[in-house]
């Protein structure tokens, strides 16, 4: 089930939120060795996890975390403009209809085919959320291997700058455009969205 | 023109391609803009899907392409193999530090320069669930590598490969869900991949040895193969098993 968490909306079950921050710690700190703050030895939370952040969280029937992404408004300090402006040749895109996608996280307890189904569902959810809420584009920073996967989802992308070597990783920033045609572009690229989740008995929510 | 505007102009052009000829033209132009002479974009094919619809676009001299094909040097191209171990662009001169090279490999790399191709830069295109590929830019022997342009080459390669993928509708060659193993078949395959015998696997999973053998045999049937080695390779190829799964404890 997809949970959309915004400050002015009904909060999600508490367990889901905590399991998201725990999954983020497992992926970004334990696996990817990012130098980011950890709370209580268990949760990855940074200064951008404030009341302005939005979260798309996919959970299984037991409210366990499957995958999640954090959206930050570009009208406030966010990651591209605050920490990685060298990845952007020109001013970082900013506006009420532009959000930054960060902390795209797939739960490590998933096996490879399930991880892919959750990944696809989360990408479809990002597009759906944008269309439902008047978001016209997303910005994102990605390590180069992940950057290529993002292109391969089929949506329209433009580079914001050249790839740079940052702390031993090759990172690049891109701009992803969401229009009414985007769901069809994703489907043509094999992103079957919620169907992939529902067809998988292990992942399907009640 | 700044680098970003060059990149954006290329992206706009390559996003609009509707034929192999368009893609060829776009790559030819950006190759020269960046100070290279040669380009090659290819799918490291997936012989299983067959159909001969591999992506392949290049402007290497004919005599090199013919020589390469005629001699089928080695089991596989060392440039392609190196592109499988990284997700960022690399120079060909760096390949010896990336993968183990056989005498045959070294011969292939030297042969390129005999045919007039000097050092090159390859951008891997490795997307999970699809056959791998790469985009390479190279110079004539004796011409220097345009170092300043390598980040742009990296971007160009990524967007060019994505355009090629769209053009060739590669995704229709993804293995169908019909080959998915059951949980038990996958568990048995995983332990086999970790080097366990059927008896050892039966102890680990709490099954009889005959049951383990049956799961593996049925897994082979799902993939249409008759050797468990092939089952493991196919499962790795389509992501049913990953190296991380196998080596994780």
Image (cartoon, helix red, strand yellow):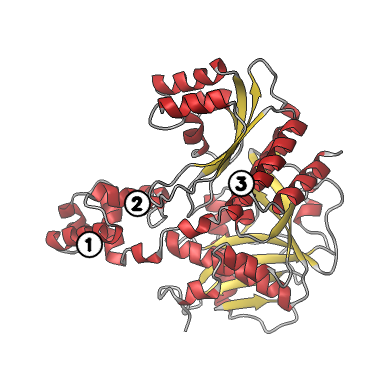
> Badge 3 is on which residue?
B161
Q: Name the image quarter holding the N terminus of chain A.
A: bottom right
Question: Could you say where residue A14 lies in the image, as x and y percent from the top left?
Answer: 59, 78
> Badge 2 is on which residue?
B234
Q: Which label was assigned to residue B194?
A: none
Question: Could you say where residue B161 lies in the image, as x and y percent from the top left?
Answer: 61, 46
Q: How many marks?
A: 3
Dot 1 and dot 3 residues touching (CB under 8 Å): no
Q: Chain of mark 2?
A: B
Which mark is first along the chain, 3 or 2? 3
Q: Between label 1 and label 3, give the one nearer the viewer.
A: 3
Q: Between label 2 and label 3, give the one nearer the viewer.
A: 3
| Above or below, B68 relative to A107 | above
Q: Which residue is drawn at the image coordinates 49% and 49% (left, top)?
A: B53
> Badge 1 is on which residue?
B218
Inspect this view and state whether residue A20 appears: no
């Amino acid at each position: 089930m997809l949970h959309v968490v915004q400050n002015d909306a009904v909060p999600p079950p508490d367990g889901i939120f905590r399991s998201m921050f725990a999954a983020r710690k497992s992926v970004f700190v334990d696996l990817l060795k990012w130098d980011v703050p950890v709370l209580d030895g268990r949760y990855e939370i940074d200064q951008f996890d404030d009341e302005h952040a939005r979260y798309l969280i996919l959970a299984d029937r037991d409210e366990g975390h499957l995958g999640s992404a954090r959206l930050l408004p570009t009208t406030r300090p966010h990651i591209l403009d605050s920490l990685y402006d060298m990845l952007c040749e020109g001013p970082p895109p900013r506006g009420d209809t532009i959000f930054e996608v960060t902390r795209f996280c797939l739960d490590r307890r998933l096996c490879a085919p399930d991880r892919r189904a959750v990944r696809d569902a989360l990408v479809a959810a990002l597009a759906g959320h944008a269309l439902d809420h008047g978001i016209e584009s997303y910005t994102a920073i990605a390590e180069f291997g992940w950057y290529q996967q993002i292109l391969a989802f089929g949506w329209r992308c433009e580079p914001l700058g050249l790839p740079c070597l940052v702390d031993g990783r090759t990172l690049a920033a891109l701009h992803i455009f969401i229009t009414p045609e985007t769901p069809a572009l994703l489907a043509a690229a094999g992103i079957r969205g919620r169907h992939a989740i529902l067809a998988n008995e292990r992942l399907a929510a009640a | 023109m700044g680098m970003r505007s060059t990149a954006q102009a290329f992206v706009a052009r390559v996003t609009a391609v509707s034929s192999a000829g368009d893609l060829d033209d776009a790559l030819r132009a950006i190759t020269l803009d960046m100070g290279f002479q040669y380009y090659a974009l290819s799918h490291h094919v997936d012989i299983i899907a067959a159909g001969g619809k591999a992506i392949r676009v290049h402007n290497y001299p004919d005599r090199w392409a013919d020589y390469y094909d005629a001699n089928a040097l080695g089991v596989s191209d060392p440039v392609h193999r190196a592109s499988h171990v990284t997700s960022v662009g690399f120079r060909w001169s760096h390949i010896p530090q990336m993968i183990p090279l056989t005498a045959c490999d070294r011969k292939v790399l030297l042969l390129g320069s005999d045919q007039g191709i000097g050092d090159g830069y390859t951008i891997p295109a490795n997307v999970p669930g699809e056959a791998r590929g790469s985009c390479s830019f190279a110079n004539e022997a004796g011409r220097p590598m345009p170092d300043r342009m390598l980040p742009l080459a990296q971007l160009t390669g990524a967007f060019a490969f994505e355009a090629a993928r769209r053009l060739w509708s590669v995704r229709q060659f993804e293995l169908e869900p019909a080959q998915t193993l059951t949980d038990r078949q996958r568990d048995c395959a995983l332990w086999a991949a970790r080097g366990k015998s059927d008896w050892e696997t039966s102890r680990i999973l709490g099954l009889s040895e005959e049951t383990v053998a049956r799961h593996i045999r049925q897994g082979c049937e799902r993939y249409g193969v008759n050797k468990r080695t092939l089952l493991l390779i196919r499962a790795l190829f389509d992501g049913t098993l990953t190296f991380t799964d196998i080596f994780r404890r």
